[in-house]
Amino acid sequence: MQRLAYKLFPTLVHYCKEVLSPQELDLIAKHCLAAESGTHAALAGDSRSSFSLNSRLIDDLDSQYAELRGLRARMEALLSSYAADMGFDDVKLTNSWFNIQHPGSVLKHHVHTHSKIAAALYIRTDPESSKLFLENPDPTLNYIRPERFTEYSFEYAHFAVAPGDLVLFPAWIKHGSGFEPNRSAMRLVVSMNGE
Ligand SMILES: [Fe+2]
């Protein structure tokens, strides 16, 4: 007999570490903490965000600080390289914004509309910060309880993120903080879209 095994419908995630230096992280954190922000529908509890479809945080950082010159090109190169592996050519960095969370706040699960690629760049986190949860796009897995979870039956995956980490994933993958409220004094993330 012949038996073939197909790994159908996998989800590609790029996880890049030490994307920014400690000095770059400090400068970005200082900028975000001083910047204007408001609320975001995906955030509940003690939190704020500079989100809008027109926000261009990465562009602003690149143009305002000599120490961050070239940041936009670096981020766009990582984004477009990931997008190319996904089969999307000529993907550009579009909007970018920051989210700041304090203890007890929750990032509700959501997708990034108006986008092909979503990226999260972690600026300030510690071991008490809520993790990044990515949901398996097969919604029926909520109702299945296998004897053991395998790469075919995980309901979700999570990442304990650290400052300087960049996570790239499809914009249609539902993500958030799972059932975990944030516990750290500060969880500061820069989010980016690629289109
Ligand atoms: Fe998001």
Image (spheres, helix red, strand yellow):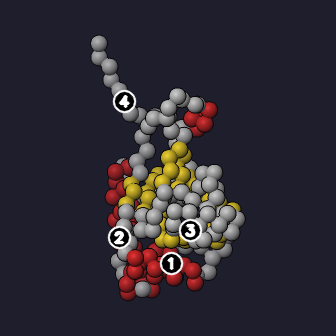
Sort mark 1 into few (<14), some (14-19) or many (20+) by Cα contacts within 10 Å.
some
Q: Which residue is mark 1?
A: 29
Q: Earlier in the sequence, mark 3 or mark 1?
A: 1
Does the rendering let one see residue 16? yes
Which marked residue is nearer to the observer: mark 3 or mark 4? 3
Residue type at mark 4 is Tyr
Residue type at mark 1 is Ala
Look at the image and tell me in which quarter the N terminus lies.
top left
Residue at position x 38%, y 33% in the image? 7
Q: Nearer the viewer, residue 121 or 82?
A: 121
Circle 4 sits in a helix, a strand or a loop, which is it? Answer: loop
The answer to which image quadrant residue 81 occupies is: bottom left
Tell me residue 121's x, y (percent): 46, 66
Q: Earlier in the sequence, mark 4 or mark 1?
A: 4
Whether the residue carrying mark 3 lies under 8 Å from ligand 1 is answered with no
| Relative side of 97 to 47, left or right | left
- The span from disc 2 to disc 3 (Cα, nearest Å) is 23 Å
Whether the residue carrying mark 2 lies under 8 Å from ligand 1 is answered with no
Q: What number is the disc on residue 187?
A: 3
Q: Which residue is mark 2?
A: 74
Q: Nearer the viewer, residue 39 or 101?
A: 101
Sort mark 3 into few (<14), some (14-19) or many (20+) by Cα contacts within 10 Å.
many
- The span from disc 3 to disc 4 (Cα, nearest Å) is 39 Å
Tell me residue 108's x, y (percent): 64, 56
Q: Nearer the viewer, residue 16 or 73?
A: 16
